[in-house]
Image: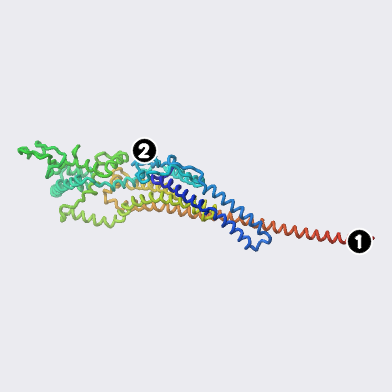
């Protein structure tokens, strides 16, 4: 049997194990026989309270008890007795292949891959027994989810999950974070000041034309790297670990010193782009999900050059770890910066809330679903008992389990629609990558729409689905009750008809017998008179 999450591997086993404990309690205490007593007493009382059937009390009671006892025994055999073994080896989960995991590994409770639940559930039940009906419902639900995912044209890249990775690009190493701040103070801010004070060079103009007007707004600006008067001419104010002293280059002013420092003071271009110790590559590699995100972008955006991908990730890492403040609050650039920030706040505030809350809502929903299923499995024996093992509880329980388990299919559809909406709003690979990393404020309205729609789909699809099934479930349950009611009514009608027939036959026999007795008396009198 397949399930739809790592957590469900364990909640399924523990849910049915707890259901077995509840079932044993009901059997050992004798409570399992309570519905039979209720059926017998209820039928007996109803038969004696009924005055509409003359002489049909016993026949109706027998017919009614036959129907109810047959129903009870059928439900007990299908839904209460554990007949189907479910072992920890046979239950398995295979994640959906997406951009983060193109070849997912199948996990079982005894081999849970890297889900993290192995330590929490160190000794899961080796095997549990599941009633036949519920085993079939779970298998049908799993097959339905698998068929829905397979029937959707075009695999999902799960861009929402990739966006969540983009939110976790913080740098854990304090030394690396401090060095990033140093680069901003010693390279970026001086270079930006010079850039604003002097005419734009041809090299900087070409870089801006190639990388966009916002290129000078971040610490890895290609305009600053290409302009020989900016990063190539500026250097670190103090030695930077990892860069060897070069008295013929960056450290030429130290050539006459008797003692040299351990590390060099590299120029800003070398500090940022060096193949071995470049700050850009170390920022990407030192962030929480930077290397994984770089691999994902490499598979998703083949048309985007490797340098552009790492630039985008490094820019996001900078925003997360190195907040920038304009160096001259009175400049026209600073005024534009604050004007843009203030204007964007009102436009995108709700969109950012939706963007920030979407991963938490998705994680909560995906975690709550298997726990809800555990509770349903655990409570099923009590629900059956309290409903007197009726077909109604049997079908309502099946609809409830199918409804909750199929949420996974609707979440897959939500992710699939979200991917296609993002591609439609950002047709080019570079724009889509920037949108995933939240690098542009100009797309605020699009983000408001798409983020709000994602949350609406994640919450709305299961809600609409479960509500519709709830309506259908009530109709099914009412139909089952109606069938049972018609069966009891047929029993009452049959009993009444039998009683009426018996009475009619009795009266006919009495009339015939009376007439025969009178005739025999008259014949005997005539014979006596003849004598």
Q: Nearer the viewer, residue 19 or 172?
A: 19
Compared to 204, does 353 lie above or below?
A: below
- For disc 2, the marked residue is 103
Residue at 5% x, 38% y is 258
- For disc 1, the marked residue is 526
Q: Nearer the viewer, residue 299 or 106?
A: 106
- Tell me where residue 233 appears, x and y as whole percent: 12, 42
- Tell me where residue 316 appears, x and y as whole percent: 25, 47
Residue found at the very far front of the displayed protein: 28
Q: In screen coordinates, is 177 left or right of 471? A: left
Tell me, yes or no, if residue 440 can be seen here: yes
- Tell me where residue 310 appears, x and y as whole percent: 25, 41
Q: Secondary structure at mark 2?
A: loop
Q: Secondary structure at mark 1?
A: helix
Residue found at the very far top of the displayed protein: 248
Q: Nearer the viewer, residue 440 or 491?
A: 491
Residue at 40% x, 44% y is 124
- Quadrant containing the C terminus is bottom right
Residue 263: image quadrant is: top left
Compared to 497, does 421 lie above or below?
A: above
Q: Which mark is residue 110?
A: none
Residue at 92% x, 60% y is 527
Q: In screen coordinates, is 161 left or right of 331? A: right
Residue at 15% x, 56% y is 330
Query: Colour mode?
Result: rainbow
- Tell me where residue 147 appears, x and y as whole percent: 45, 43
10 Å crowding of disc 1: few (<14), some (14-19), many (20+): few
Q: CA distance from mark 1 to mark 2?
A: 111 Å
Q: In screen coordinates, is 169 left or right of 421? A: left
């Amino acid at each position: 049997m397949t399930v739809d999450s790592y957590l469900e591997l364990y909640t399924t086993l523990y849910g049915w194990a707890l259901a077995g404990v509840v079932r044993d309690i009901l059997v050992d205490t004798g409570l399992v026989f309570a519905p039979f007593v209720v059926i017998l007493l209820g039928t007996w009382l109803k038969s004696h309270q009924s005055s509409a059937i003359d002489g049909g009390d016993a026949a109706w009671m027998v017919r009614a008890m036959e129907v109810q006892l047959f129903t009870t025994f059928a439900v007990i055999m299908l839904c209460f007795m554990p007949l189907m073994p479910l072992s920890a080896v046979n239950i398995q989960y295979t994640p959906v292949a997406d951009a983060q995991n193109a070849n997912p590994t199948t996990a079982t409770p005894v081999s849970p891959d890297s889900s993290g639940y192995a330590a929490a559930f160190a000794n899961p039940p080796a095997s549990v027994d599941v009633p036949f009906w519920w085993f079939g419902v779970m298998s049908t639900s799993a097959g339905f989810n698998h068929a829905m995912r397979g029937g959707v044209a075009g695999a999902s890249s799960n861009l929402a999950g990739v966006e969540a990775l983009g939110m976790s690009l913080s740098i854990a190493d304090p030394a690396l974070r401090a060095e990033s701040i140093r680069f901003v103070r010693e390279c970026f801010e001086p270079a930006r000041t010079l850039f604003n004070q002097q005419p734009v060079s041809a090299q900087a103009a070409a870089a801006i034309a190639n990388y966009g007007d916002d290129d000078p707004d971040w610490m890895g600006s290609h305009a600053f790297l290409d302009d020989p008067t900016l990063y190539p001419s500026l250097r670190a104010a103090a030695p930077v670990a990892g860069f060897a002293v070069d008295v013929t280059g960056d450290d030429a002013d130290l050539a006459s010193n008797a003692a040299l420092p351990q590390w060099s003071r590299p120029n800003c271009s070398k500090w940022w782009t060096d193949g071995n110790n470049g700050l850009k590559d170390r920022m990407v590699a030192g962030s929480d999900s930077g290397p994984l995100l770089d691999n994902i972008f490499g598979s998703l955006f083949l048309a985007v050059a490797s340098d552009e991908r790492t630039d985008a990730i490094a820019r996001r890492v900078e925003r997360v770890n190195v907040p920038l403040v304009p160096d001259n609050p009175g400049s026209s650039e600073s005024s534009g910066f604050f004007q843009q920030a203030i204007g964007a706040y009102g436009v995108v505030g709700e969109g950012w809330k939706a963007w920030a809350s979407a991963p938490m809502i998705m994680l909560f929903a995906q975690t709550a679903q298997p726990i809800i299923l555990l509770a349903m499995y655990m409570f099923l024996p009590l629900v059956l008992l309290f409903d007197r093992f009726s077909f109604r509880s049997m079908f309502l329980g099946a609809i409830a389990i199918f409804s909750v388990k199929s949420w996974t299919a609707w979440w897959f559809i939500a992710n699939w629609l979200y991917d296609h909406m993002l591609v439609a709003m950002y047709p080019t690979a570079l724009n889509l990558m920037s949108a995933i990393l939240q690098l542009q404020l100009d797309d605020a309205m699009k983000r408001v729409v798409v983020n709000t729609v994602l949350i609406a789909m994640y919450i709305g699809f299961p809600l609409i689905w479960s509500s519709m099934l709830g309506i259908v479930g009530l109709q099914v349950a009412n139909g089952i009750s109606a069938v049972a009611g018609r069966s009891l009514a047929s029993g009452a009608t049959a009993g009444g008809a039998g009683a009426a027939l018996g009475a009619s036959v009795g009266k006919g026999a009495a009339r015939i017998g009376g007439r025969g007795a009178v005739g025999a008396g008259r014949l005997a009198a005539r014979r006596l008179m003849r004598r």
